[in-house]
Each structure stands twice: as structure tokens, then as C-alpha cells.
Image (tube, rainbow, N blue to C red):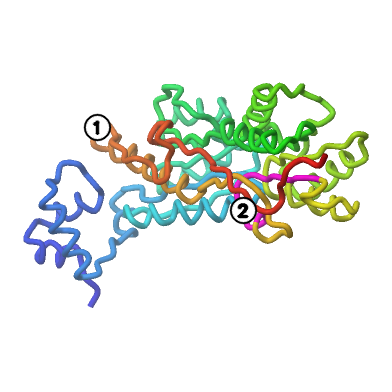
């Protein structure tokens, strides 16, 4: 027989309402009672009945809203969100939207009309859309934003920050330290603030090393393999051509590596290439790509944790409390992450 909430209550020596409060992470239950209840849940292998919660009117789904061409990013985010949702008794709903459709809010309203959505996790570009944010505030539905930045703008909703600027500075600083002076930057779509922040970090590091900005080496494009290959082909036709390429993600970098090989340019001896995010592209290429490790699973888990705390606080009329984010940088707020440089085989000192 499957264990029930009353079985848990009997084993723990508490009321079933106390068990419900513990499962819902309500702060009114003391630590000793919580330990007894969780021990009983584990012993009985009790699984909360999500359907019953819905029938009682308790929204129990967290919706993951995204529009990102990088399948690796989306999958890692899903895994991180799902793990935290399961640990806290919530279900995860995956809901892709087209950022350029013009019907984003109408699509969201249709999703929210079911009444099962307790809160939203917004990823770029939706998390950086002021009109959408204002509409959600008006609706008073809890949400958390994952954004490119390093500080809290004192918004009422929780935010998770990814310090793309400093990570891009570190990458460019590393290349300049290897003696590279002609460093190209291949960006992504500027609808994603991460592309803008990475470009700004790149420019700041150039200035730090006294390297003049060359607009011809800053090539806008898209976050995909073909865009990286095409732009690198054009860069290699320049005289003098760059000795290093900083690509705004690993797919662009893989495209750059492909174009270099087609044009018989040795990597890294003649051209160093760096990516960003540490996706499978960076480890499956040859040579393996130097990149910046972005812990998407931890970022997603932190987003879910902050959102669920916000949902419970709004239901209980109390302030949300949060724990430090896993692997977060000590110089950042507890909801901040900084991608870290990972040096592999695609970079070396600049050719003489």
C-alpha cells in the first residue's frame, strides 16, 4: 500500500496538518518537528499527491519560460530547475515562447489561465523585457528573473545574476596576457543582454592592456555555429588578420574553429579561439576549446529556490528567506554567479 500523509503523521507523532506545513516549507514549524517529519517521509517513501493539492486550489507548477537557440543551455536549465522543484514538492512545466512574436503576454495569459501555475522562471530575453515585467507585476504572480549583470537593482522580485561582463574581461585579459593584440569579438544577438555585457567586458580588457578598439574586429551576428563559421571566414581574409578570436558562446567558437580548419589556419599556433559557457561543443571539438564555465544547472536551481521562497512568503504574508547559491562568487550577492575561465588546447601565445 502506498503511504499516505496520515501514515507520515502517525509515525512522526504529529498532526497531518503539521506534515503538510513541513512539506510546503512553511516557517511556522520548529526545527525538531521538521526533522521528525522528514525522517518519517523518508522511512515510508511518501510522495506528496500533486493532484490533490491542485484540487484544493493550491497551484503547484513552476513554469520555465525561455527562447534560446542553445539546446545545451535549455537542457541544463531544465535539469537544475527540476531537481529543486522535486526537492520542494513542486512540478516543472517547460514552456518555450517566441520572443519576437509580439504575442508573448497573450501566450502567457493562456498558460496562467489554468490556475495551476504558482510562479515563473524567466530567462533572457524575457527576463530583460521591461514591458513584460511590468505586465507580470500588474498580475501579481511571483516570478524570478535570470539576467546578465552583477548587482541587485533593488527590484521587488528575486533575480539571479550572471556576471558576463567580468567573465568576458577575464577571457580577454588572458588572451592579451598571451601577447595577442589583434583580438576579434564575435557576438550574439543583442536582444540577449549577455552578448552586450560580454562585448563590454572585452572592450574594458582591451583598454586595460592599452589595445585600441578596432571596429573591424567586432563582428555582430547570431549565437550559432553557421554564424561563427561565416564571420571567421571574413576575418581570415583581412590583412593583417586577427591572432585570436573571442566568441560569445561555444557554438560560435566551434564554427570559428571549423572555418579556420577549412582555410588551413592552424589552431592555436596561428589563431587562438575562445568560447563561452563550457557546453559540449567546447569538449567535443579538436582541439578542445578554452572557454568560460557557466554553471547553468546551479543557476537554475538557485532561481527555483528563490522563486519558491517568494511564493511561500506571499502565501504566508512573510518575507522570503534565501540560502547562498551553490558555487557563487564571494564578491557577488548570494544570488550571483560568475563564469570561470577554463583553459584548454585552443589557445597559446601569439605568433611572432
Q: Residues within 10 Å of mark 2 (few under 14, many from 20)?
A: many
Q: Is residue 119 left or right of residue 178?
A: left
Please say whether residue 278 is one of the residues in the magenta stretch.
yes
Residue at the image position 81 percent from the left and 25 percent from the top:
215
- Name the quarter where the N terminus is drawn: bottom left
Quadrant of the rendered structure where residue 230 is? top right
Q: Secondary structure at mark 2?
A: loop
Q: Position of residue 116 (x, y in %)?
A: 40, 49
Q: Is residue 194 left or right of residue 295?
A: right
Q: Nearer the viewer, mark 2 or mark 1?
A: 2
Point out the tag, 2 or 1, that comes first from the N-terminus.
2
Q: Position of residue 179 (x, y in %)?
A: 73, 35
Q: Is residue 75 above or below residue 44?
A: above
Name the one closer to the observer, 111 or 82. Answer: 82
- Residue 143 can be seen in this image: no
Residue at the image position 60 percent from the left and 50 percent from the top:
278
Q: Which mark is residue 317?
A: 1
Q: Which mark is residue 37?
A: none
Q: Residues within 10 Å of mark 1 (few under 14, many from 20)?
A: few
Residue extent of the magenta highlight:
271-282
Q: Which residue is mark 2?
A: 279
Q: Residue furthest left?
A: 13
Q: Position of residue 111 (x, y in %)?
A: 51, 45
Q: Is residue 165 left or right of residue 261?
A: left
- Residue 109 can be seen in this image: yes
Quote the CA–CA distance across marks 2 and 1: 41 Å
Q: Secondary structure at mark 1?
A: loop
Quadrant of the rendered structure where residue 327 is? top left
Please say whether residue 117 is one of the residues in the magenta stretch.
no
Amino acid at each position: 500500500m502506498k503511504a499516505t500523509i496520515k501514515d507520515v503523521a502517525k509515525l512522526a507523532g504529529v498532526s497531518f496538518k503539521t506534515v503538510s506545513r513541513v512539506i510546503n516549507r512553511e516557517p511556522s514549524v520548529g526545527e525538531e518537528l521538521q526533522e521528525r517529519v522528514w525522517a518519517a517521509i523518508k522511512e515510508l517513501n511518501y510522495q506528496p499527491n500533486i493532484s490533490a493539492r491542485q484540487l484544493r486550489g493550491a497551484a503547484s507548477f513552476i513554469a520555465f519560460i525561455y527562447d534560446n537557440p542553445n539546446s545545451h543551455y535549455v537542457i541544463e536549465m531544465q535539469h537544475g530547475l527540476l531537481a529543486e522543484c522535486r526537492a520542494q514538492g513542486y512540478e516543472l512545466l517547460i514552456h518555450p515562447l517566441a520572443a519576437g512574436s509580439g504575442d508573448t503576454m497573450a501566450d502567457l495569459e493562456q498558460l496562467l489561465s489554468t490556475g495551476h501555475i504558482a510562479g515563473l522562471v524567466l530567462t533572457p530575453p524575457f527576463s530583460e523585457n521591461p514591458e513584460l515585467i511590468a505586465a507580470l507585476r500588474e498580475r501579481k504572480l511571483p516570478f524570478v528573473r535570470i539576467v546578465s549583470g552583477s548587482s541587485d537593482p533593488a527590484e521587488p522580485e528575486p533575480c539571479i545574476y550572471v556576471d558576463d561582463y567580468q567573465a568576458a574581461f577575464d577571457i580577454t585579459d588572458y588572451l592579451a596576457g598571451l601577447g595577442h593584440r589583434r583580438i576579434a569579438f564575435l557576438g550574439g544577438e543583442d536582444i540577449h543582454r549577455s552578448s552586450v555585457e560580454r562585448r563590454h567586458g572585452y572592450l574594458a580588457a582591451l583598454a586595460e592592456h592599452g589595445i585600441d578598439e578596432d571596429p573591424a574586429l567586432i563582428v555582430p551576428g547570431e549565437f550559432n555555429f553557421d554564424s561563427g563559421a561565416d564571420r571567421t571566414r571574413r576575418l581570415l581574409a583581412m590583412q593583417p588578420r586577427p591572432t585570436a578570436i573571442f566568441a560569445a558562446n561555444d557554438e560560435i567558437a566551434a564554427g570559428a574553429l571549423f572555418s579556420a580548419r577549412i582555410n588551413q589556419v592552424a589552431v592555436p599556433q596561428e589563431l587562438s579561439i575562445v568560447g563561452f559557457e563550457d557546453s559540449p561543443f567546447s569538449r567535443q571539438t579538436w582541439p578542445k576549446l578554452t572557454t568560460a564555465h557557466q554553471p547553468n544547472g546551479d543557476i537554475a536551481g538557485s532561481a527555483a529556490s528563490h522563486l519558491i521562497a517568494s511564493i511561500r512568503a506571499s502565501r504566508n504574508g512573510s518575507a522570503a528567506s534565501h540560502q547562498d547559491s551553490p558555487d557563487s562568487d564571494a564578491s557577488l550577492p548570494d544570488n550571483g554567479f560568475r563564469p570561470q575561465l577554463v583553459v584548454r588546447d585552443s589557445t597559446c601565445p601569439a605568433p611572432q
